[in-house]
């Protein structure tokens, strides 16, 4: 229930817990798509460039079709956000790459 209330902006939730719960949320894209980097930082905290992320995530990014695009990883999670014209256009779970 905490996650549902957090999504609605009614309560606070540890961002790492929210990111883990997002995996099973079929409407998770609504939390991210159309948002700016500033809005996503306000919701999740840290956004990392591929260079700032772990070697694993950096390798996934380098081997992906998103290489060269404006992307950020949400905290230390497997979630990558693709930006176009300063707005999030895609949310990608970089798992098993």
Image (cartoon, helix red, strand yellow):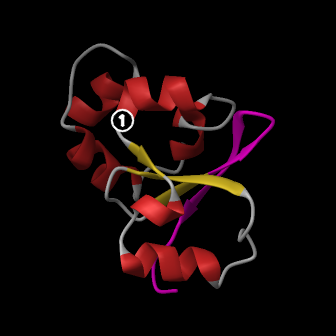
Q: x, y (%) of residue 31?
A: 52, 34
The one of 27 and 71 positioned closer to us in this rendering: 71
Q: Residue at x 43, y 30 (%)?
A: 41
Left or right: residue 17 compared with residue 76? left
Left or right: residue 42 compared with residue 92? left
Left or right: residue 40 compared with residue 86? left
Left or right: residue 54 compared with residue 94? left
Q: x, y (%) of residue 94?
A: 50, 72
Mark 1, secondary structure of its residue: helix
Q: x, y (%) of residue 63?
A: 64, 85
| Relative vertical location of residue 44 with respect to residue 73 in this rendering, above or below | above
Residue stretch in magenta = 82-97
Q: Is residue 20 visible?
A: yes
| Relative vertical location of residue 67 with respect to residue 35 in this rendering, above or below | below
- Is 85 magenta? The answer is yes
Identify the residue position indicated by label 1 in the image. Answer: 44
- Is 65 magenta? The answer is no
**The N terminus appears in which quarter of the rendering?**
top left
Q: Is residue 1 visible?
A: no
Magenta residues, dominant SS class: strand
């Amino acid at each position: 229930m905490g996650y549902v209330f957090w999504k609605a902006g009614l309560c606070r939730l540890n961002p790492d817990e929210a990111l883990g719960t997002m995996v099973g949320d079929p409407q998770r894209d609504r939390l991210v798509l159309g948002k700016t980097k500033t809005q996503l930082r306000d919701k999740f905290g840290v956004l990392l460039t591929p260079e700032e992320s772990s070697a694993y995530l950096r390798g996934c990014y380098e081997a992906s079709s998103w290489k060269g695009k404006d992307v950020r990883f949400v905290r230390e999670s497997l979630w990558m956000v693709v930006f176009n014209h300063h707005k999030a256009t895609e949310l990608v779970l970089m798992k098993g790459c």
